[in-house]
Image (cartoon, rainbow, N blue to C red):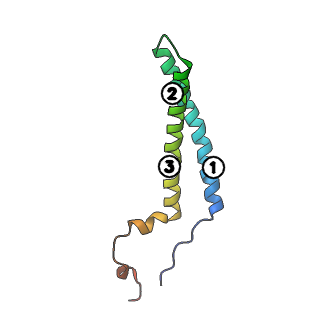
Amino acid sequence: MPRPDPTPPLESLKQQFLKIMRWGALFSLTVAAIAVVLVAQGDETVHIHMLIATALGVGLSVMLGIALMTLVFLSSRMGQDADAADHSPKDQHDDRS
């Protein structure tokens, strides 16, 4: 009977997720700051509420994208996606020839 691949320990995956999210937060802050500067340069009457909304909207959108893509990569690395992508009948996976 085939044995499933060993899954990596969850603690190391958690460490990888947090490491990626730290870099993602830095990237998100940078992108939000660039967006605020571009919005401030484009309008003569700068409203603080518009700048806050721009920073929060851009920053949180980038963070959400980074978090979701990180979860996709880590679940793929754990092997969680292998069963979802397997569309062949279970009989073909038996090695009892």
Identify the secondary structure beneath mark 3.
Answer: helix
Q: Is residue 56 above or below residue 93?
A: above
Q: Are marks 3 and 2 in contact (CB under 8 Å)?
A: no
- What kind of residue is marked 1? Leu
Identify the secondary structure beneath mark 2.
Answer: helix
Q: Earlier in the sequence, mark 3 or mark 1?
A: 1
**Residue, far bottom:** 97
Q: Earlier in the sequence, mark 1 or mark 2?
A: 1
Q: Which mark is residue 3?
A: none
Q: Is residue 59 above or below residue 47?
A: below
Q: Nearer the viewer, residue 10 or 39?
A: 39
Q: Position of residue 76 (x, y in %)?
A: 48, 60
- Tell me the quarter of the picture where residue 81 sits: bottom left
At horizontal 49% and vertical 15% (from top left) the residue drawn is 41
- What kind of residue is marked 2? Thr
Decide: few, some or many residues near mark 1? Use Cα within 10 Å; few <14, some 14-19, many ≥20.
some
Q: Are marks 3 and 1 in contact (CB under 8 Å)?
A: no
Which residue is denoted by mark 3 in the rendering? 68
Q: CA distance from mark 3 to mark 2?
A: 21 Å
At horizontal 52% and vertical 53% (from top left) the residue drawn is 71
Q: Which mark is residue 54?
A: 2
Decide: few, some or many residues near mark 2? Use Cα within 10 Å; few <14, some 14-19, many ≥20.
some
Quadrant housing the C terminus: bottom left
Label 3 or label 1, whichever lies nearer to me, is 3
- Count of labels shown? 3
Q: Position of residue 17 (x, y in %)?
A: 60, 52
At horizontal 39% and vertical 79% (from top left) the residue drawn is 93
Q: CA distance from mark 1 to mark 2?
A: 25 Å
Which residue is denoted by mark 1 in the rendering? 18
Q: CA distance from mark 3 to mark 1?
A: 13 Å
